[in-house]
Image: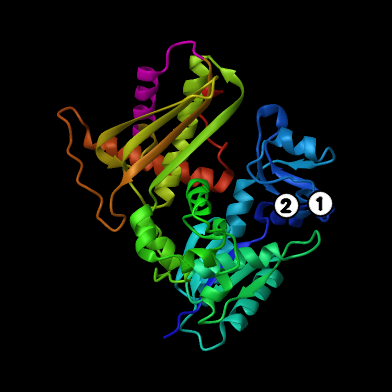
Amino acid sequence: MVRKILHFDLDAFFCAVEAQRDASLRGKAFAVGGRPDQRGVVASCSYPARRFGVRSAMPMATALRLCPDLIIVPHDHAAYHEASHAVMARLRDLTPLVEQLSIDEAFLDVSMLPQAVETVARRLQATINDELRLPCSLGAATNKLVAKIANNVGKAGAQGDDPPNAIKVVPPGQEATFLAPLPITDLWGVGPKTAEKLIELGMHTIGDVALWPEDDLIRRFGKHGRDLARHARGIDERPVEPVHEAKSISKETTFARDVRDGAKLRRVLRRLAEGVGRQVRQSGLRGATVKLKLRWADFTTLTRQVTLEHPTDQDAEICAAALRLFEQNWPEGRPVRLIGVGVSGFEDPQAEAPHRQLGLWDDVDEIEQARRLQAALDELRDRFGDEAIQRGSDL
């Protein structure tokens, strides 16, 4: 069977959600992100803003210099997650084979549907446009690699200030022909260093890579050389994987001004640990490794981690480990620019909860009571927001 793979991407997703909530933003140059006086960055920007050179991940202060009339809209992550959930539900209504890559991006395998892949793409786009009022673009091909690149090409060819809402289809058998004229930097796995080496050898397009002897690419680049040769010819046999294993879950914050107050740093650390713990529980995971991240005023970054005796999803255990790392690695009074907490080392989410080895003085009732309290706090925050319950020490 010839596979039918879609790459789905919401266009300027955060901005599209904000324009739904405030119609006055439509057609305006605006960006979602943090304030420039607090070292904020651009999380998403409207297409009119892009005409001025504004881009995602750009410091907001730089964006304002490029576009002095730029409207800045603060994040509303709850709204974005709600909209994303509705979108992904529509995708899974179409096929169970949905590999979600991020809050606004996914692969779909629609090979089992009888309709032509372009027909499926247009119907899906119409569903998202009409039912959720969100613009989206799709690339269609026989594999993930070409579908992703097709979507990028389709969006790049859009004109004007409106979201692309593009569809680009690469017919079966045309993969190598489609890729051939594109620059080598469009190929997965070709970063700046690899591109530099390929250009030194005289390869500027994906077609140049496809024509190069595979044995020589393997000799020069190892296993990566084999992948380059196959990908340049449009070969990609990876399946669409509905379950995407999380490697780590983390949260961090950059301070508007460097912080040297230990009490404030500990409060922020506790808040971040609680946010990580909640996300770990929502993902149905338990992790055994807790990581601390500190960035000093000179931008150097320190990371330290500790492995727990047993995997956990509890705020108190994550927080205690993070605070221990903090006390061991923060020279008192040293200014901190960024602080973060992460959990990794996840066990099999399908495995039963492990029977925790109790210590001599552990109280089974206290452990169970702590879990029930955590569940009650999660329910309150789900219903009334993250600020519904706070520590007395933080007030």
* Label 1: which secondary element: helix
Residue indicated by mark 2? 18
In which quadrant of the rendered image does the N terminus lie? bottom left
Q: CA distance from mark 1 to mark 2?
A: 8 Å
Q: Is residue 214 or residue 358 the one in the foreground?
A: 214
| Span colored in magenta | 317-334
Tell me the tag on residue 25: 1
Residue 136 image point, x, y percent: 66, 65
Camera sees residue 203: yes
Q: How many marks?
A: 2
Q: Quick check: 131 left or right of 107?
A: right
In the figure, 350 relative to 169: above or below?
A: above
Identity of the residue drawn at 76% across and 54% down: 47
Residue 317 image point, x, y percent: 34, 33
Camera sees residue 313: no
Residue type marked 2: Glu
In the figure, 374 relative to 201: above or below?
A: above
Main SS, magenta region, reads helix
Q: Are marks 1 and 2 in contact (CB under 8 Å)?
A: yes
In the figure, 249 relative to 307: above or below?
A: below
Residue 268 image point, x, y percent: 51, 27
